[in-house]
Image (spheres, rainbow, N blue to C red):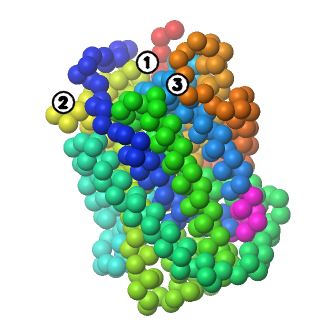
Amino acid sequence: MNQPITGKENELKKTLGPFMLWGLGVGYVISGNYFGWNLGLAEGGTWGAAIAIFFIILMYITFTFSYTEMACAIPRAGGAFSYAERGLGKQLGFLAGMSQNIEFIFAPPAIASAIGAYFSIFFPEWNVLWVGIGAYLIFTLLNVVGLQIAATFELFITIVAVLGLLFFAGVTLPEFDASNLSTKGFHQGYMGIVAAIPFAIWFFLAIEGVANVAEETINPQKNILRGFGSALLTLVILCLLTFVSAVGVGGWEAIVYPDETGIASDSPLPLAMEMVVGSDHSYYHLLTFIALFGLVASFNGIILAAGRTTFEFGRVGYAPKVIGKVNKKFKTPGNALLFNMVIGIIALLTGKTGEIITIAVFGALGLYILSMIAFFYLRKKEPDLERPFRVPMYPLFPMVALVIASISMLAMILYNFMLALLFFAMLIGSFVFFRIFIYKP
């Protein structure tokens, strides 16, 4: 059995303040505004997607505040894994950690594919796959060299991506027509709401990664709350602004289907911008260029968070020891970052971007469900644990998050049954390995 790796030489360096945490929290997620969310419109129409987004926003508000309580009380790089192991024991802790690993390892290859696709707009002769692989190499190296460098870069590109969304809204909102929101607004009925849930989640997927850098945060008991709260507020505002301004210029079909082939687009914002200014206008090209910043922000940010989740698995002995070692020179989880890169590139080579996104969402929902259960158990088992921040309206907030996440998981299984089997096969297969070779009561 692997033994936990301990000692100051294997501790991560504290470098992050609240502004950096805001940049990471928004950066993890912001690519969801630039692509992917519009597919929910095809499933539920404007109103079906809007209702799904409302419930998902409610889930993330209640989840984030509940998660922040645990992150401030237990500032460990493992995030959900650390909380679930402490609250629920090793076995359920392992499942929470694996769900987290699946989310953070499988989200980047989907974004890498989108980065390649956006680059092909400007450089059509470039191979999309090689661009994605190149992005993996560059940003993994950036994160190996140092968190401060990676986080500073993340902050810069996140600010650019936020300004890009505000620029988009500023150009399109003057052309907003409320009647466009009603065109086929509820064309799939109530089941359309259920079908749109995964794409609503894409607006916020991975914000919980802020907790995974708690160990590298200066005064985490205070700064984690500030970073989480400000990031979530920013993302809710951007989500609503993007949704209304994009759909409002021409109806939902115009930003889902660019032509008569019936193939859905991965670039809804350029489609909306084109309806306002045309595809030859400088505003159109500027938005397309800025969209790359949004994709890179999420790509770099999730790589950063994923390195911490895998690292913690190795450090506590639930994965090979080599994964849980800190790079002696840079004080970063270098081996974990390289391991994740290899898995991500293999996933990227499949070319199944949509399926990869769905698997990542399954991982996220598994994380949300198990971490909220752990929240209740920690409150019961360790009532005297120092909690610098306590979730408001307990037990309502964590219960709302748990119920919505559970319903969302059922909806995902219903509409993506084969991918659900793949996700649970990965989860169960890794758990069987854990029980046979690692677990010790």
- Foreground mark, 1 or 2, reads 2
As displayed, is residue 65 above or below residue 302?
above
* Secondary structure beneath label 3: loop
Q: Residue at x 51, y 47 (%)?
A: 230
Identify which residue is drawn at 54% across, 76% down.
170
Q: Which residue is mark 3?
A: 388
Alpha carbon of mark 2 to alpha carbon of mark 3: how far?
32 Å
Question: Which secondary structure lies at badge 2?
Answer: loop
Q: x and y percent of residue 196 in the render?
A: 69, 59
* Viewer-proximal residue among 166 and 93: 166
Residue stretch in magenta:
42-52
- Pick the quarter of the image with the N terminus: top left
User: Is residue 422 something that shows in the picture?
Assistant: no
Q: Earlier in the sequence, mark 2 or mark 3?
A: 2
> What residue appears at the point 27 percent right and 27 percent down from the top-left corner?
325
In the rendered image, which residue does mark 1 sit on?
Answer: 437
In-front residue for pair 436/77? 77
- Residue 352, magenta (yes or no): no
Instruction: Identify the mark nearer the N-term, 1 or 2.
Output: 2
Q: Position of residue 316 (x, y in %)?
A: 39, 20
- Nearer-the-camera pick, 33 or 224: 224
Q: Secondary structure at mark 1?
A: helix
Mark 1 in CB contact with mark 2 (< 8 angstroms) = no
Determine if residue 174 is in view.
yes
Asked if the stretch drawn in magenta spans residue 48, the answer is: yes
User: Disc 1 to disc 2, how far (Cα)?
Assistant: 29 Å
Q: Amino acid at mark 1?
A: Phe
What is the quadrant of residue 381 in the picture? top right
Q: Main secondary structure of the magenta part?
A: helix
Q: CA distance from mark 3 to mark 1?
A: 37 Å
Residue 328, label in figure: 2
Callout 2: 10 Å neighbours few (<14), some, many (20+)? few
